[in-house]
Structure formats: C-alpha cells, structure tokens
Amino acid sequence: MPPFLRGKGSGWVTAEYGMLPRATHARGNREAAKGKQSGRTQEIQRLIGRSLRAVTDLKAMGELCITLDCDVLNADGGTRCASITGAWVALRLALGKLVANRVLPRMPLSGQVAAVSCGLTSAGAVLDLDYAEDSTALADTNFVLSADHRIVEIQATAEGTPFAEDAFNTLFSLARQGAGELFAAQLNAIHTAEQPTT
C-alpha cells in the first residue's frame, strides 16, 4: 500500500505506463535507462489511475493495492486512451479472480470506464486519430467516459486557433459513439477470458 493509505482500511488502484523501444517509428530509449520518467509518462500514469479509481469502490477493496501495467507495444496515436480501456479489462479480470477466490467479498467495481480520442482535421471531426491525423489536427481531445453516460475526464486542446463550442459538441457526440463500441468490446474480452477451457 502507498504510505499515505496504510492503516486507513482503503484500497488503491494505480498504473504504470511505458513505451517499449520499438513502439514508435524511430526507436526510443527505455526511460529506465535514463533513470527517470518523463513528465508525459507521469501525467499519463496519473490519468489512468484516476480513471480506474473513478469506477472502483476503494473501501470495498480493504488494504489491497493493484497496479496495472500499460506497456505500449505499437504506438500510432491514442496510447493513453487504449491504456485506460485495456487497463479496465485487466482490473475487472483481476478483481473477478479475487472475488472467486474469496479474497474479496464482492466485486468493488461500480461500472465500466473507457477512453477515446477525437480531433478536428481539415476533413472534419475524426474518431480515434492515428499519428498522422493527430500531428496535423486543428484540435485534439481525449474523452474518458463511464458506461452509464457520465464523464470522468476530458482533455481538449486547440492546436493553433481556438475552436467553437459546436465543434466540441460534435467531438463529444462522436466520442460517446466510440466509447459505446469500446464498452461492448470490453465485455466481450471479459466473457472470452472467463470462459472455461476444455
């Protein structure tokens, strides 16, 4: 447990995020070799942790800490969103095993969380931008949403000139559609993983 939570009777969910050396077009060095994490890595780790804790009853976990490893194998934009979406699946599977083994009396998750990127390009609003689209976007947004239609976090940045509110609403609507597909994919992944093997 983190020192600030020891003896408090509450659990914790956090994440470690990292780009593997060949995840991008040009090979990058491991941050461990540099001896410290970049500000970007730390910010993404905090975002993943916040997103997962938003749908987790930490008191129901007792003094248990779960760390989700988010290793980017192939980066083409949207790695923080993919990390949040995949980490929720890993968290749900881990907690499911703890409940099945009677380590926890009940499932401490209150719902699903997923994240998706959207952006404004010269062609209009785009869902799940790849690197080429992201690098030339007029606006870049990340939406972290829950399956019960609530907002966990929104990151929105204009790349150059400000963008209008109606453009943001278009991006938000597109993100809701994309998140709906991700929620279905998460449940399908859990169903597949929990099927008994023969």
Image (cartoon, rainbow, N blue to C red):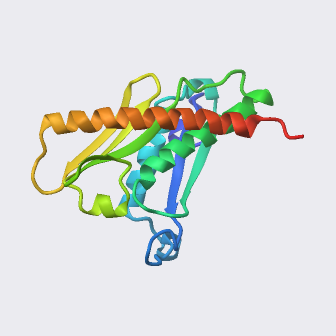
Q: Is residue 156 above or below residue 17?
A: above
Q: How far across and down, in percent of the image, does residue 155 sit?
A: 29, 44
The quarter of the image holding the C terminus is top right
The quarter of the image holding the N terminus is top right
- The residue closer to the viewer here, 36 or 128, is 128
Q: Is residue 143 visible?
A: yes
Residue occupying the far left of the picture:
161
Q: How far across and down, in percent of the image, does residue 32 sit?
A: 52, 71
Q: Relative to 5, is 94 on the left or the right?
A: right
Q: How far across and down, in percent of the image, does residue 183 sit?
A: 52, 33
Q: How many marks?
A: 0
Q: Is residue 132 above or below residue 53?
A: below
Q: Relative to 96, is 158 on the left or the right?
A: left
Residue at 69% x, 33% y: name it: 191
- The residue closer to the viewer here, 59 or 184, is 184
Residue occupying the far right of the picture:
198
Residue at 52% x, 76% y: name it: 33
